[in-house]
Image: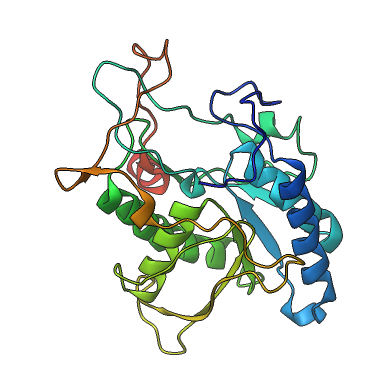
């Protein structure tokens, strides 16, 4: 759903469907970093969590370098793929943070992903369920692990996932929002919020005013192809038909069950 991509599908990670940014995307990523650096220090991100896909890691890299904060890889922020057509295999899954660090040195591999989307794909409701479940696990874990050190966390993800996370955060799955490339959404925790879902106010929605050319190439769920009320199935990666769809979902639950 990030569209600032090269025309070919070759990736340094060798993962199918994991292309790098085009030159325009790299320019926008640098502009985002410059914008953050222009903010007062008490308004800058203190941690960066990125989708494991290479284009998001590339987008995160300039901000990480400029701000001097690490990139944590989180599969819960992964790209959205529609359900796979039966018999065509599974969708790709990026490698571990430790392996991705060979490509992006700013990655801190001490963070273990808390959530994995199914490689069988998701319909529109399921990607919202994933976003909400991820947030419910992620927010308290960050608060506990870092003792509330990180008050301004930057999430770098893909248009569909950003939309789903925003909607789940404000508690409105019908929130009209289209996400341009390298746009910024700012969410602030409600003072008396007792829940994660619906516990945030949107101070800024998919804004591109920090970019020299403004908002570009926006995407929304209304751009999806629908048949019989559902998103059209996609094909999996050839050769993955015998692979297991594992792990999936909240990994904290798995850890707790083993304790």
Classify residue 248 as left or right of residue 38: left
Specify the quadrant of the image occupied by residue 8.
top right
Q: How is the image coloured?
A: rainbow
Question: Is 118 above or below relative to 256?
Answer: above
Name the outermost residue toward the bottom.
191
Q: Position of residue 190 (x, y in %)?
A: 45, 85
* Image label count: 0
Residue 249: quadrant of the picture = top left
- Could you say where residue 183 lies in the image, as x and y percent from the top left? 61, 64
Percent across and percent down for residue 162 are 48, 59
Q: Residue at x 70, y 50 (%)?
A: 59
Where is residue 213 shown, x and y percent of the image? 73, 65
The answer to whether 27 is drawn above or below residue 119 in the figure is below
Q: Where is the C terminus found, in terms of image quarters?
A: top left
Residue 157 horizontal side relative to residue 26, left or right: left
**Residue ID at (50%, 60%):** 141
Residue 146 in view of the camera? no
Tell me, yes or no, if residue 84 can be seen here.
yes
The residue positioned 32% from the left and 42% from the top of the image is 257
| In front of the other: 213 or 105 | 213
* Residue nearest the observer in this picture, 78 or 70: 78
Say which of 119 and 42 sits in front: 119
Q: Residue sitting at 39 percent across and 38 percent down?
A: 81
Is 253 on the left-hand or right-hand side of 63? Answer: left
Left/right placement of residue 133 relative to residue 157 reads left
């Amino acid at each position: 759903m990030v569209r600032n991509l090269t025309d070919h599908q070759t990736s340094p990670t060798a993962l199918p469907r994991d292309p790098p940014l085009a030159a325009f995307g790299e320019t926008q990523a640098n502009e985002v970093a410059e914008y953050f650096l222009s903010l007062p220090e008490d308004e800058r991100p203190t941690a960066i969590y990125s989708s494991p896909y290479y284009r998001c890691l590339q987008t995160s890299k300039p901000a990480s370098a400029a701000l001097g904060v690490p990139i944590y890889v989180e599969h819960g922020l992964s790209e959205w793929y529609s359900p796979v057509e039966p018999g065509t295999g599974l969708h790709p899954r990026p490698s571990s943070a430790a392996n991705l660090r060979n490509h992006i040195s700013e990655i801190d591999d001490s963070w273990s992903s808390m959530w994995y989307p199914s490689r069988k794909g998701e319909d529109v409701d399921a990607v919202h369920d994933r976003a909400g479940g991820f947030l419910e696990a992620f927010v308290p874990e960050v608060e506990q692990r870092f003792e509330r050190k990180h008050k301004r966390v930057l999430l770098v993800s893909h248009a569909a996932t950003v939309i789903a996370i925003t909607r789940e955060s404000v508690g409105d799955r019908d929130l009209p929002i289209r996400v341009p490339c390298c746009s910024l959404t700012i969410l602030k925790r409600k003072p008396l919020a007792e829940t994660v879902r619906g516990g945030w106010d949107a101070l800024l929605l998919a804004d591109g005013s920090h970019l020299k050319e403004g908002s570009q190439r926006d995407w929304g769920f209304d751009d999806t192809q629908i048949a019989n009320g559902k998103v059209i199935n996609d094909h999996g990666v050839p050769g993955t038909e015998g692979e297991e769809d594992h792990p999936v979902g909240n990994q904290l639950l798995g850890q707790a069950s083993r304790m």
